[in-house]
Amino acid sequence: MTPAEFPYNPYGVSRARFAVVPRVLVFVTRDDALLLLQRASHKKLWPGLYNPPGGHIERDETPDEAAVRELQEETGLQVQSLHLRGLLMAHAQNDLPGVVVFIYHAQAAGTLHKINDEGTPHWIPFAALDAIPTLPDFNQLRALVLEQPDFFTLYKIAHSDGSESVRVVYQRS
């Protein structure tokens, strides 16, 4: 038997099973404001819309390390405190991998970058959040992260007609 016939597979991974791409999303608050990134106009997905900083988890990187790195890269800020608040499990259609997003609440210090390839970071007063264009699930995630105390998992399943099924499960302490 050759190694190609029996590859090393310590976790029992199978291409026939559901797979996910790991990402992070970081809600940073300061006084009466939330840090959001206005996505660059050249972005393929959601150009010009506002969302918290975040991105992909790299190989050999923990979710916490990715959250710290993405926040620094996209905003210039340094994390002072970081708390995992929940997970988002998004199932794509067909055989595409889904997404698992580790969602954090953080406090950070430093000076914001003016602009970068991802977009432009802004401190948005809480009172102004409803007046800006945000990603479709932003308000639900904001409420889950900032307004309720329990750890949550948000399950989303995309349907071929463009709709989604959404379910939230809370881990009560």
Image: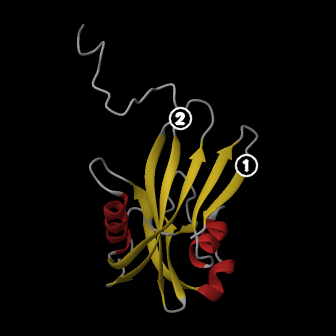
Disc 1/disc 2 C-alpha distance (Å):
17 Å
Identity of the residue drawn at 65% across and 59% down: 169
Circle 2: residue type: Phe
Q: Hey, which quadrant is residue 117 in on the image?
A: bottom left
- Specify how the rendered protein is coloured: secondary structure
Identity of the residue drawn at 54% across and 34% down: 96
The answer to whether marks 1 and 2 mark residues whose Cβ atoms lie closer than 8 Å is no
Q: Residues within 10 Å of mark 1 (few under 14, many from 20)?
A: few
Determine whether 118 is above or below 157 in the image: below
Name the outermost residue toward the bottom. 31
Q: In which quadrant of the rendered image does the N terminus lie?
A: top left
Circle 1: residue type: Ser
Rendered location of residue 19, percent (x, y): 49, 37
Query: Which label was assigned to residue 1?
Result: none
Give the residue pinned by disc 2: 18
Q: In which quadrant of the rendered image does the C terminus lie?
A: bottom right
Rendered location of residue 60, percent (x, y): 26, 49
Name the outermost residue toward the left. 2
In the shown orientation, is residue 160 left or right of residue 94?
right
Identity of the residue drawn at 56% across and 50% down: 89
In the shown orientation, is residue 103 left or right of residue 59?
right
Q: Hey, which quadrant is residue 79 in on the image?
A: bottom left
User: Helix, strand or loop at disc 1?
Assistant: strand
Using the image as rendered, state which of residue 32 and residue 118 is in the foreground. 32
Rendered location of residue 41, percent (x, y): 51, 61
Name the outermost residue toward the front. 173
Identity of the residue drawn at 37% across and 58% down: 63
Using the image as rendered, state which of residue 47 and residue 54 is in the foreground. 54
Query: Which label was assigned to residue 165?
Result: 1
Using the image as rendered, state which of residue 42 and residue 79 is in the foreground. 79
